[in-house]
Amino acid sequence: MIQIARDLSAHLRRFRIVRSATLIIAILIGAAFGIRACVTALLVDCYEDTADLPSPDLRHIAHRVVRICKGPLAFNVNIIQFIELSTVGTGFNLRVFESYEDDGSIRWNAGNELAIEVGAVSTIRRSLHEADGVRITYHVPRKLLDLKAAEDSERQTEELHQTGRLTDRDYETGKEIDRWLRRWREDFIRWASENAIIDEPKF
């Protein structure tokens, strides 16, 4: 329990630091250059991890790109994963999937089907199901479709406050974090339920 309290307290301190630092930086830099320039200034070191996978008939190529940008401070990290589909010899190129997480993979199935494996809870920004005659399917493991992590965090916050290990102020901050975590996971579960094939565990 002591370790849980330490972890949550550290989490709360980081949350307040991030919130304060973000506000100050947005005011100082955003006033001169605008919000877009502020983001560009923060994310100064970017690199990409790319992988290309041709379709079995060699007519299409799936491109998986993970772009990671790091800023001058430890919390300035931005990760975007996107998958694009191109048609050989035509110039056709379309982004079919985009998420804020780098845990995923792609494969071609029979029948000109591109399968995208989503391996972690994430904010999904785009998920097309067809492009240039290619069927696109999404696969999510069932273990990602529960709220246990959110419920555990909420229970720990309540326990720490009831036993006096969290001040009222930190308790309110903790509940704010818990609400965000729950909404984030619920949004992912909703997307997966409506768009993905749920893969059962393999024993």
Image (cartoon, rainbow, N blue to C red):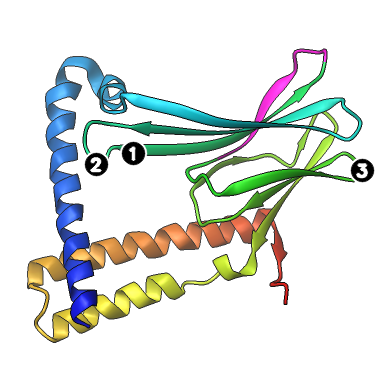
Vertical arrangement, residue 200 with respect to residue 106, above or below: below
Q: Amino acid at mark 2?
A: Ala
Residue identifier under label 1: 77
- Report the side of 149 relative to 66 (left or right): left
Residue found at x 25% / y 62% = 176
Q: Residue furthest bottom?
A: 163
- Measure how far apart labels 3 and 2 are at the Cα level: 45 Å
Pointers 1 and 2 in contact (CB under 8 A)?
yes
Vertical arrangement, residue 51 with respect to residue 111, above or below: above
Magenta part of the chain: 89-98
Residue 83 is situated, as x and y percent measured from the top left of the image, at: 63, 34
Residue 97 falls inside the magenta stretch:
yes
Mark 2 crowdedness (10 Å alpha carbons): few <14, some 14-19, many ≥20 = few
Residue identifier under label 3: 111
- Measure how far apart labels 1 and 3 are at the Cα level: 39 Å
Residue found at x 39% / y 76% = 151
